[in-house]
Amino acid sequence: MTSTIDMHCRPATGTPADAYTLGPLQSGPSCCDPEPLIRVENLSLSYDNKPALAGVTLDIYRGCITALIGPSGCGKTSFLSSLNRLTDLIPGCEVEGRILINRQDARAPDLDVQTLRRQVGMIFQKPNPFPLSIRRNLEMPLREHGVRNRSELCDRLERTLTDVGLWDEVKDRLDTPALALSGGQQQRLCLARALALEPSVLLMDEPCSALDPLSSAVVEDLIQRLRGRYTVVIVTHNLAQARRIANYAGFFWVRERAGTLIEFGRCQQIFEEPAHDLTAAYVSGARG
Amino acid sequence: MAKYGLFSMTITSNLDRFMTLAIWSAALLVAAAFLWLLGDVLWHGAAHLSWSFLTEAPENAGRSGGIGPILVSTLMILAVAVAAAVPLGLATAVWLTEFIRPGSSFGRLVGLSLDVLAGVPSIVLGLFGNAFFCVYLGLGFSILAGGLTLACMVLPIFIRTAEAGLRAVPADWRNGAAALGLSRGAALIHILLPAAAPALAAALMLGIGRAMAETAALIYTSGYVDRMPSSLSDSGRALAVHIYDLSMNVAGGDPNAYASALVLITLLIIINSTALWLAENLLQRRIVTA
Ligand SMILES: Nc1ncnc2c1ncn2[C@@H]1O[C@H](COP(=O)(O)OP(=O)(O)OP(=O)(O)O)[C@@H](O)[C@H]1O
Ligand SMILES: [Mg+2]
């Protein structure tokens, strides 16, 4: 018997038609009611018995954008991968601690990992569209998750591509290879691919770092629009970007060879009045 | 200083010239050897080639008549070998790349035994095939026994080549598929296997090439009866065995041996281009367009 995590937490406002079209651009780190969707308690992670993360405890709030910052190698990617259990795929990777997603244990051995990953989507640093056509990139995962109805598939295809602002650019060449798109378009396609599965959480691992400033701005705008509808956790090395888009921020640092969470709080507080010297030095650009 | 520089430059360019010459002559030599071989077979074989040669039964120990039954036996043996080796080989390659921990000792043991198996001389495999398939399993001298022995022979190279192809598929796609909640099977069918299709086709062609050219392993297993086979349990003579027999055991068999060799080469070219075409159109097309 496998259990699944029920995360129907999207506000059920509006008609079904506009329920999927992302709302207007919200600006500035305003905040939503701080209700934790993901609770991480004392998470530790090691690769081949070498610790990479130690004792991370934090809450990720529903509908908010949480930015994770910190120097290279401090375990940000490892942290993200433990949330959707991508760490299961890495031989020698051990995770300890508790991860509750919507009050359910995401680390339970009997949890249906495929459903978990459908609900907790992930965008990688390097755009990774499949070597398929644009259409099949979106439709194949949907079909595998049981969406077989043709008109439903077409609907979601158009809706998600419109959401990521790609529809007008690709609607005449849906059957051409996705790998022929530019890097920025590929990353937006990956975002559309994740959105098509209607996740409630999106994990983004430096989604803009492989893109030029213009494409990066486009993707950043998109992430802003996800606020409220999705719970976003974004890793970024771009502090200005974190400051622009995030509601909450967490600062990681390597201590005794393992990544630890030094400070977590409202974005404004982390950047303007950090409680910790390391954080202050890092956000002011003095260290890291 | 300048003089020294100039001096060393002339040395390099002389060395360069020599290297260029050596590399070109090596390439030419290889090409010439291949063309000479092909020309020789064409020259001696083409004269005897005709439609009736392809369809008629051999007469007078193969000195006259055609190779009809031999062609049929060859294709049947090949079909058995491919039907046995491809599913088994593909499953093993997938297991080696996708289902075991990299560097696991059992995986390494399997890899090692494959490499040893790949180096076993075909005559030894023929003896094994005879003892195991013909005698122990009671298949006798038959096309089935011959095909299965060939399957054992081509499995190692097929698996190793397919494995390399699968390993070359970028990890980004594996992670991307997993992050979308796709099952391992779905990732394999929709992404990994199609992306590795050219390598899989190459693996198939290497295997078929070895199987078609095989003589030693077949003499003991499928035998050399040159009648038209009526079923898989009949003995059948493969083309390579026929060529060997005509040129070694039959006085005056050379002209037909050459003609048969020409047929063998043509058959190889046809099968290889079909495999390439299939890989591009069935598996790859889904990747690029559909
Ligand atoms: N698959 C792996 N096997 C072994 N060690 C790993 C693996 N992945 C990461 N590590 C180690 O774990 C530590 C944390 O890595 P991680 O990739 O999580 O850092 P990061 O904060 O994402 O860094 P970056 O900002 O460079 O992406 C590093 O010391 C790294 O060497
Ligand atoms: Mg990282």
Image (cartoon, rainbow, N blue to C red):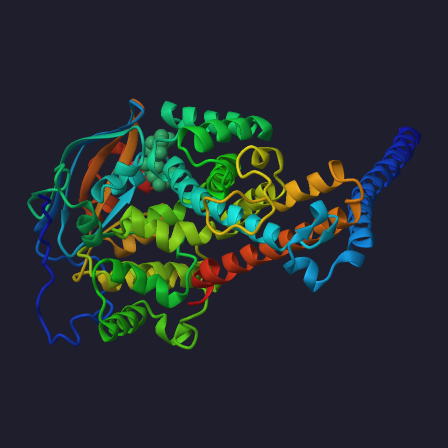
Q: Looking at the image, in which quadrant does ligand 2 appear?
A: top left
**Residue B224 in the image: x percent, y percent?**
60, 40
Q: Nearer the viewer, residue A89 or A166?
A: A89
Task: Assign the N terminus of chain A to one quadrant of the image.
Answer: top left
Q: Residue furthest front?
A: B60
Q: Nearer the viewer, residue B265 or B199?
A: B265
Q: Is residue A207 visible?
A: no
Task: Assign the C terminus of chain A to one quadrant of the image.
Answer: top left
- Residue at image position (57%, 27%) is B119
Residue A224 figure quarter = bottom left
> Height in image: A152 above or below A198?
below
- Residue at image position (31%, 35%) is A90
Tell whether A129 sits left or right of B202.
Answer: left
Residue B167 figure quarter = top left
Tell whether B126 sits left or right of A155.
Answer: right
Q: How many marks?
A: 0
**Residue A36 in the image: x percent, y percent?**
9, 48
Q: Is residue B126 visible?
A: yes
- Residue at image position (70%, 45%) is B61
**Residue B150 in the image: x percent, y percent?**
52, 38
- Residue at image position (57%, 37%) is B218
Q: Nearer the viewer, residue B274 or A44?
A: B274
> Height in image: B156 above or below A272?
above
**Residue A116 in the image: x percent, y percent?**
18, 49
